[in-house]
Image (cartoon, grey):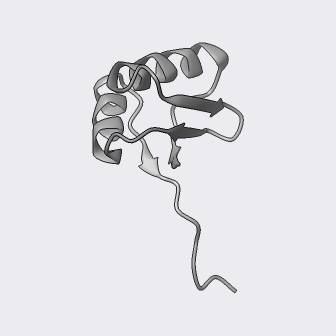
Amino acid sequence: MLNFIVPDMSCGGCASSVKRALLSVDPSAQIETDPPAKTVSVVSDRPEAEFLAVLAEAGYPASEDAPQQGAA
């Protein structure tokens, strides 16, 4: 599973646009969006870079949501 932070996704309309962009990479991907948290989860075999690229092209630049390690 890939997890992304999408800072510009703030509403349901934004989430629909994000989901549509991601499905253009992999039409069979399982996608969950959470606009209040600004996060997206994607289950797909496609490379992460393809999803990041299509999100940027759609006007929703994203970053990988990785757990913080070593935080006390």
Along the horizontal axis of the image, is 6 left or right of 26? Answer: right
Along the horizontal axis of the image, is 68 left or right of 60? Answer: right
Q: Quadrant of the C terminus?
A: bottom right
The residue positioned 45% from the left and 16% from the top of the image is 20
The answer to which of 14 and 27 lies nearer the viewer is: 27
The residue positioned 48% from the left and 16% from the top of the image is 17
Q: Position of residue 38 (x, y in %)?
A: 61, 38
Res. 55 in view? yes
Along the horizontal axis of the image, is 37 left or right of 2? Answer: right
The residue positioned 58% from the left and 67% from the top of the image is 67
Q: Position of residue 37 (x, y in %)?
A: 69, 41
The residue positioned 31% from the left and 29% from the top of the image is 54
Q: How many marks?
A: 0
51 shown above or below 68: above
15 shown above or below 1: above
Res. 6 in view? no
Along the horizontal axis of the image, is 62 left or right of 54? Answer: right
- Residue 52 location, quadrant: top left
